[in-house]
Amino acid sequence: MEERFIEWTANSITSKTNFNMRMYLNTKERIIRYEEDVEKESRKNNKLCKCCYYIKDAYGFSAMTTSYCGICKESILNGSSCTNRVCDKCAESHKLCSRCGGKMEE
Ligand SMILES: [Zn+2]
Ligand SMILES: [Zn+2]
């Protein structure tokens, strides 16, 4: 494999540096939201843990994707290629995040 030549100019440097700053601010904002659990209600309704709700970028490419619940084997229809580990029912009864299967915070 070989990458094509990318000329690195003063503009490239400025734009990358700005991008890095936005990335930092965006990450910081997510951590604050995580720690304060600002949308607890909506997060719980969506059966998502704090990490999946606030930190991860859960945007797979949007193609309806079927996955299977890792507990009851029920099929789950997902709106994108970012699939759920467990179905809503199992997430509810085991107090797990439906997306990643980790424990739900109270
Ligand atoms: Zn299930
Ligand atoms: Zn999760």
Image (spheres, rainbow, N blue to C red):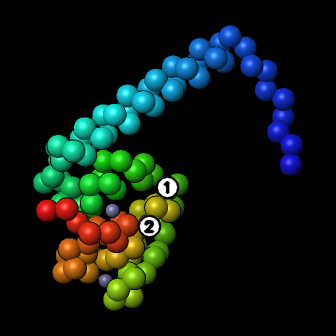
| Horizontal and vertical percent position of residue 99 | 35, 66
Q: Which mark is residue 83?
A: 2
| Horizontal and vertical percent position of residue 68 | 43, 81
Q: Is residue 6 left or right of residue 32?
A: right
75 or 36: which is nearer to us?
Answer: 36
Q: Is residue 36 above or below residue 81?
A: above
Q: Are marks 1 and 2 in contact (CB under 8 Å)?
A: yes
The residue sitting at 17% across, 43% down in the picture is 36
Corner quadrant of residue 9 = top right
Name which residue type carries label 2. Thr
Q: Is residue 4 above or below residue 56?
A: above
The residue sitting at 55% across, 20% down in the picture is 17
| Horizontal and vertical percent position of residue 13 | 64, 17
The residue sitting at 18% across, 47% down in the picture is 37
57 or 37: which is nearer to us?
Answer: 37
Q: Which residue is mark 1?
A: 60
**Residue 74 visible in the shown view:** no
48 or 77: which is nearer to us?
Answer: 48
Q: Residues within 10 Å of mark 2 (few under 14, many from 20)?
A: many
Q: Which numbered disc, 1 or 2, marks the residue that appears first in the sequence?
A: 1
